[in-house]
Amino acid sequence: MCQTFHPLLRPHGRIVNVSSTASSLSNYTPALQSRFRSPAMTLSDLEAMMDEYQAAANNGTERRNGWPKQAYAVSKAAMNALTATLARENAGLVINCCCPGWVATDMGRMVGSTPSKAPSMLGSYFRATRVAVG
């Protein structure tokens, strides 16, 4: 979606992706952590990593290959890497990701904060801030 809408953004336009604490790389091998954090990562590199994960998950070998068991965690780590890569490759845009914290959703068993409060807490931060990547 980011790549599709990118040409429509004005200079200094913004992309904000919603992340999660599930994106933590602590459950990955050091080699995978380094790949996710590489300042040289390209979109092709990230796509290749996700292909590797998908193959391992399909074979039931993701844990043996250093990935966490939860696909959600992998998707959020990949989204963070995508955000960092897009930010490096598009200096004229403001590209961030954020974690709204535990929000009451079906996935979170409705025990977090009220969903309507999360965006307002983060909105003013992202209107005023450009997060450095690198």
Image (cartoon, grey):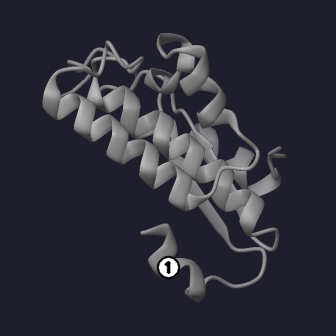
Q: Decide if residue 22 is on the left or right side of residue 104.
A: right
- Quarter the N terminus occupies: bottom left
* Residue that numbered label 1 is attached to: 5
Residue located at (26% from left, 40% from top): 54
Residue 105 visible somewhere in the drawing: no
Q: Decide: is 57 above or below 94.
A: above
Quarter of image, res 116: top left
* Residue at image location 35% in from the left, 40% down from the top: 52
Left or right: 54, with 12 as reference point: left
Question: Which one is nearer the viewer's eye here, 83 or 61?
Answer: 61
Where does the C terminus fall, quadrant-wise? top right
Task: Work out whether 4 lies above or below 51.
Answer: below
Which x, y percent locates residue 123? Answer: 63, 49
Looking at the image, is 114 positioned above or below residue 83?
Answer: above
State whether residue 116 appears in this view: yes
Residue nearer the viewer, 22 or 81: 81
Relative depth, front residue between 128 and 52: 52
- How many marks do you count on the picture? 1
At 60% from the left and 51% from the top, the residue drawn is 83
SS type, badge 1: helix
Q: Is residue 70 above or below residue 92?
A: above
Q: Nearer the viewer, residue 54 or 23?
A: 54
As shown in the figure, which amino acid type bears the numbered disc 1? Phe
Image x and y of residue 17, in percent:
52, 51
Which image quadrant for residue 36?
top right
Residue 7 appears at what percent x and percent y?
A: 58, 87
